[in-house]
Image: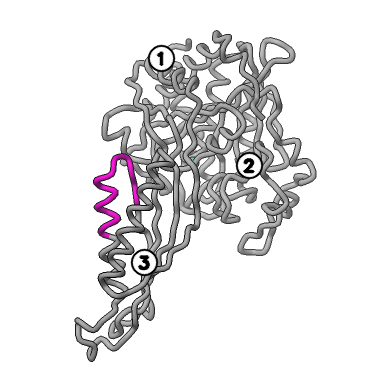
Amino acid sequence: MPTLAKTKTRAEDIVARCKRLASFSEDSGSVRRTFLSPPMHDCHREITKWLTAAGAEVKVDAAGNLRGFYAASQSTPPRLLLGSHLDTVPNGGAYDGVLGVLIALALVESLEGRRLPFAIEVLGFSEEEGVRFGTPFIGSRALVGRLDEELLQRQDVNGISVRTAIENFGLNPAEIPRAILSDDTLAYLEFHIEQGPVLESIGRPLGVVEAIAAQTRMEFVFVGRANHAGTTPMHLRHDAIPAAAEWILAVERTAQSYPDLVATVGRIEAKPGAINVIAGEARVTLDLRHKSDHERAHAIDVLLRLAQEIVERRGVSLRQRTLLNQRAVAMDPFLVDQIEKAVGSAGCQPHRMISGAGHDAMILAEKIPAAMIFLRSPGGISHDPAESVEVEDVAKALECGLHLLDQLASSSEFQKRTCRA
Ligand SMILES: [Zn+2]
């Protein structure tokens, strides 16, 4: 195990590198690096330099994922994947995704040429946020064989398809199948900033992710009757807006009283939308998440019943449609236990938690055991230039990662595992 001073220096380097990579942006003055945009070349060039110096062999697969292979002590060993994503949202921060890739790199550097019984493949996914094509996880989908023709044909706002974007970046879409996980893959581990306030609120630097939350996105349309705001008495109205408003408050009340549920109405749109007209239609969105699929479905039922009761009482009607239903994804229980132990060995009190946001680990978990470690997000802020991380927390993450690698290197149970693909 490296000295604490050395780990602290490496943590400072990681933060400095995150800031350096943040300068590779499509926009001047803020970070925006979408799927295979020109600044991604610069990002790849920098990380390749660091990975090569650490003894890894680097290539970019046909989906634009950067892959650094650090060989094992044996000639044909299994491999452990460590990484996160390199794309960002518009006006993003310097740490979402990138930090996980650079921690993976620093773990390889910390080995200082020492070889483990398994190889380490450092992954910098090309796309996680879904900004350019409206579809997230293009990078990790390629690894599980889900970068299909339909996705390749999707177009960005300039009419450029995923396929053309890949070609324009100098890659060959015909080679996408070669990006698929090899049979010798043991597991995927991802360090990521929490992007929320929980760890800060309990004063702990690291979180152990047990599952990625189930998520439902819906649209509710409350339909009333538009009419004159001056001539229609209150008792003769069928006003869509108060009906929607009553339901929105019911959503908030329900989520407040329902353990582990988060529910958000993030958009309201009224028609015709004039100051002197009673609204004939109020369209609102619902984003609802829970760690359990069963509880999520139950909460949706409750909110539907409440909406029905409100529209009947108010003489309006309701239409609703589901835009997304994403099942909860459990992290691998063996790895979760191992991470908890490693967090303790790094001198931190472990905290098990659910990720409310989706991550590449969720996609990889379809095929191989996957797990995540969260780092405290100061102020709970993410997807914003104010996003940050504490150097001390990065040092703790590195310490935890090194303990974890040692634990896995000495675990015959872990190394016996093979790809479920
Ligand atoms: Zn992210």
Asked if residue 99 is positioned above or below residue 133 in the image, the reply reads above
Label 1 beta carbon within 8 A of ligand 1? no
Res 64 seen here: no
| Residue 359 horizontal/vertical position (percent) | 51, 39
Asked if residue 204 is positioned above or below residue 317 in the image, the reply reads above
Q: Label 3, on which residue?
A: 268
Where disc 2 sits, the SS reads helix
Of 324 and 195, the residue lying toward us:
324
Q: Identify the mark nearer the N-term, 1 or 3.
A: 1
- Image quarter (top left, top right, bottom left or bottom right) of the C terminus: top right
Q: Label 1, on which residue?
A: 4
What range of the chain is rendered magenta? 249-263
Res 261 seen here: yes
Which residue appears at 40% of the width and 53% of the height?
A: 287
Q: Label 2, on which residue?
A: 141
Label 2 beta carbon within 8 A of ligand 1? no
* Image quadrant assignment for residue 80: top right
Where disc 1 sits, the SS reads helix
Q: Identify the mark nearer the N-term, 1 or 2.
A: 1
Task: Bin the neighbour count of mark 2 within 10 Å (Cα to Cα): few under 14, some 14-19, many 20 and up.
Answer: many
| Residue 42 horizontal/vertical position (percent) | 63, 42
Majority secondary structure of the magenta segment? helix
